[in-house]
């Protein structure tokens, strides 16, 4: 399973990720993403990958679930 995460140091709060994936990403009051911690599967994984590719600062990541690595 994959999970979305954001690098808070790299993120500049453009908000493009929330526009592309509103069902998984909300913006806080300053425009920075709040990521749904649930695993991303199926059709949502394709949309998440598109949002990751579109991030202008490469701050959005789609990682393998940490339990999967064990």
Image (cartoon, helix red, strand yellow):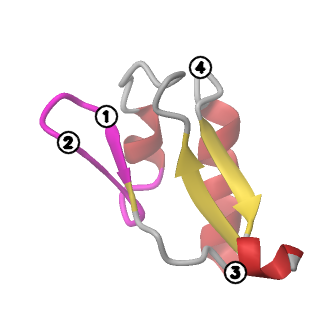
Q: Position of residue 2 (x, y in %)?
A: 71, 70
| Of pointers 4 and 2, the one earlier in the residue sequence | 2
From the image, state whether disc 3 or disc 1 is nearer to you: 1
Instruction: Determine which residue is flagged by label 3.
Output: 42
Q: Position of residue 27 (x, y in %)?
A: 26, 43
- Element carrying mark 4: loop
In magenta segment, residue 33: yes
Q: Are marks 2 and 1 in contact (CB under 8 Å)?
A: yes
> Residue 47 sits in which quadrant?
bottom right
- The span from disc 4 to disc 3 (Cα, nearest Å) is 25 Å
Of the pair 20 and 28, the residue shown nearer to us:
28
> Residue 45 sits in which quadrant?
bottom right
| Of pointers 1 and 4, the one earlier in the residue sequence | 1
In magenta segment, residue 36: no
Picture layout, residue 19 above or below residue 41: above
Picture layout, residue 49 above or below residue 43: above
User: Residue drawn 41% across and 18% down?
Assistant: 12
| Of pointers 3 and 1, the one earlier in the residue sequence | 1
| Quadrant housing the C terminus | bottom right
The residues colored magenta run 21-34
Instruction: Determine which residue is flagged by label 2.
Output: 28
From the image, state whether disc 3 or disc 2 is nearer to you: 2
Instruction: Determine which residue is flagged by label 4.
Output: 57
Magenta segment main secondary structure: loop
- Element carrying mark 3: helix
| Number of marks drawn | 4
């Amino acid at each position: 399973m994959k999970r979305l995460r954001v690098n808070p140091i790299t993120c500049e709060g453009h908000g493009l990720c929330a526009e592309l994936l509103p069902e998984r990403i909300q913006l806080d009051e300053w425009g920075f993403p709040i990521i749904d911690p649930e695993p991303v599967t199926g059709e949502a994984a394709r949309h998440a990958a598109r949002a990751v590719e579109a991030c202008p600062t490469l701050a959005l990541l789609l990682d393998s679930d940490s339990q999967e690595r064990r």
